[in-house]
């Protein structure tokens, strides 16, 4: 029997609804159930691939090549599962499917209407994901907050599902309780209003998770219970915690798992969460401090610096760090700074390691190339991910091989030495302005050279990693680069495409065309990130 738990947000976004959803999944999985999670984004974009990462956060790529909201990454990391495109729903995707069906005469001549056909398509998709993941419980997180116009049809879908089978559907409201400094008291009114907005959509929350800076006290719980029409025991305190990995532990303390089971009339069950608890403790208490620089460009919005665009990279560092007793201190560096001020580049030397993650377009590219040169020459451990790998090939070509002005055709279409070039099958797509969902996406096999560092790290010859790119290592330059010391450590066995490059006589210099960060898990860190940190630790201890 399949059961569904809707998670919607009240008051404001950014309060950790995704982590809350992933954590609820985690505690249910810990009790022995199969859990799936679906994210609904209200955007008209068909997928997250066409959204600006500063605005929307990282584009998380699933194994089947889905360009998804970063919350799918949270679900995969917390649940140690792999999901697919089917676990991500957007307004655009739903409308596209309905219109396609209408064009195919699949509605048998009936008028196709926003209600109920859009909610019906949403429901069909939710059920399909549940089936595909063979899940006992499917969590459905509705993006944004209640009260947004664009979410109305998704709330309608939730209401319809509850009506169809009340015993199989549960609603959780994740709300926010501010404690304004000038008042000095935790206020419940915004949550009362959020709950009422849900009521207007015909939905009564079964459980309210009260996100706040501190624990929610009894009088606050009573107020919410009274005014939101919900038994006090289902008002759950969810205070700020030191690390996101503490959230499931807090839910366990609040007995949330059994309260959910009880709502579904299922006998309570014991869960241990023991390995997770150990990890969550260690992830906060690494002894060895290391300074890591991430050089990127998707951080700034007005006066604020956000790190959401690189969330999987950051978490992959943390996963690898706790196992090695490392406390990583991560700094953000704006690549453009290195273009504006020459001397600033020397600050790289104060870092123990440098990561250049993925990216698009030429803003900041020359700054990143300068940083790579310094890492190569001064033997600073370096990990290049996708764009980071491509730029390290450009740097090597320019400064070691002597191919002056070598570049990627992404940044200079007529460059003399296009050491990174557009993939053949991508050319036509770009010419036809076909950008959405057309990159080389998802998992591909890579065969690793047995003599490489990467082989040592992976300890296997065949690996499979996730991709998202249009440009590739130009094999015309391969022999020239190899003669000068570049190691081709891995390639795709079918296309021959270069997937991993390395430099010898360096503590750690690895560039990968794929995104290893998407496969890192808190209890199962990724070998490349572990190898990167291990080599730094070893250099420092020397
Ligand atoms: N812009 C580069 C490409 O399209 C790199 C992409 C990335 O870093 N994800 O190939």
Image: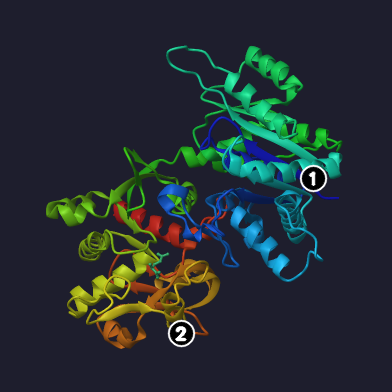
Kind of element beneath mark 1: helix
Against 492, residue 154 (above or below) is above
Identify the residue at horizontal 45%, vertical 81% (top origin).
Answer: 428
Q: Nearer the viewer, residue 521 or 93?
A: 93
In the displayed structure, would residue 324 be above or below residue 193? below
Q: Is residue 370 left or right of residue 498?
A: left
The quadrant the C terminus occupies is: bottom left
Around disc 2, counting alpha carbons within 10 Å, would you say few (fewer than 14), some (14 to 19), or many (20 or more)? few
Scheme of colours in the image = rainbow
Label of residue 496 in the image:
2
Q: What x and y, as percent, mark residue 411? A: 29, 70
Residue at the extreme left of the image, as rendered: 343
> Quadrant location of ligand 1?
bottom left
User: From the viewer's perspective, is the residue at label 2 or at label 1 nearer?
Assistant: 1
Q: Using the image, tell me which numbered label, if any, was put on residue 161.
A: 1
Quadrant in the picture for residue 247:
top right
User: Does any atom of ligand 1 lie closer than 8 Å to the CB of label 2?
Assistant: no
């Amino acid at each position: 029997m399949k059961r569904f738990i809707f998670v919607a947000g009240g008051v404001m976004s950014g309060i950790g609804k995704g982590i809350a959803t992933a954590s609820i999944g985690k505690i249910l999985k810990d009790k022995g159930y199969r859990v799936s999670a679906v994210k609904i984004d209200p955007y008209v974009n068909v997928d997250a691939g066409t959204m600006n990462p500063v605005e929307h956060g990282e584009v998380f790529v699933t194994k089947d090549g889905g360009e998804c909201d970063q919350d799918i990454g949270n679900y995969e990391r917390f649940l140690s599962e792999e999901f697919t495109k089917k676990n991500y729903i957007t307004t655009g995707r739903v409308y596209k499917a309905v219109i396609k069906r209408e064009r195919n005469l699949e509605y048998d001549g009936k008028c196709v209407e926003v209600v109920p056909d859009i909610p019906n398509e949403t429901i069909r998709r939710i059920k399909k994901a549940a089936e595909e993941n063979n899940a006992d419980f499917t969590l459905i997180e509705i993006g944004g907050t209640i009260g947004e116009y664009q979410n109305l049809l998704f709330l309608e879908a939730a209401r319809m599902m509850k009506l169809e089978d009340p015993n199989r559907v549960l609603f959780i409201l994740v709300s926010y309780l501010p404690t304004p400094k000038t008042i000095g008291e935790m206020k419940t009114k915004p949550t009362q209003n959020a709950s009422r907005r849900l009521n207007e959509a015909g939905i009564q929350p079964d459980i309210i998770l009260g996100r706040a800076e501190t624990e929610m006290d009894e009088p606050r719980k009573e107020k919410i219970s009274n005014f939101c029409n919900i038994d006090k025991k289902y008002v759950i305190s969810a205070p700020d915690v030191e690390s996101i990995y503490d959230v499931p532990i807090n839910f366990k303390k609040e007995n949330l798992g059994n309260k959910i089971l009880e709502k579904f009339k299922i006998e309570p069950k014991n869960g241990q969460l023991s390995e997770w608890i150990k990890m969550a403790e260690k992830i906060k208490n690494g002894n060895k401090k290391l300074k890591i620089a991430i050089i990127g460009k998707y951080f700034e919005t007005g006066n604020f610096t956000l790190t959401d665009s690189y969330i999987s990279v950051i978490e992959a560092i943390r996963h690898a760090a706790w196992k090695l007793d490392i406390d990583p201190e991560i700094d953000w560096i704006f690549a453009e700074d290195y273009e504006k001020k020459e001397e600033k580049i020397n600050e790289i030397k104060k870092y123990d390691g440098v990561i250049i993650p993925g990216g698009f377009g030429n803003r900041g590219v020359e700054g990143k190339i300068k940083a790579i040169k310094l890492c190569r020459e001064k033997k600073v451990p370096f990990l290049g991910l996708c764009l980071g790998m491509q730029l390290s090939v450009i740097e090597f070509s320019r400064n070691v091989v002597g191919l002056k002005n070598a570049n990627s055709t992404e940044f200079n279409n007529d460059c003399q030495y296009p050491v990174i070039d557009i993939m053949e099958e991508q050319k036509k797509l770009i010419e036809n302005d076909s950008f959405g969902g057309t990159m080389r996406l998802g998992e591909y096999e890579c065969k690793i050279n047995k003599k490489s560092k990467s082989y040592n790290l992976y300890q296997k010859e065949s690996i499979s990693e996730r991709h998202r790119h249009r440009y590739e290592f130009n094999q015309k330059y391969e022999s020239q680069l190899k003669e000068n010391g570049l190691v081709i450590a891995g390639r795709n066995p079918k296309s021959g495409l270069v997937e991993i490059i390395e430099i010898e006589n360096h503590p750690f210099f690895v560039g990968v065309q794929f995104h290893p960060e998407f496969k890192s898990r808190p209890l199962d860190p990724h070998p490349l990130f572990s190898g990167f940190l291990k080599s730094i630790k070893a250099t420092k201890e020397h």
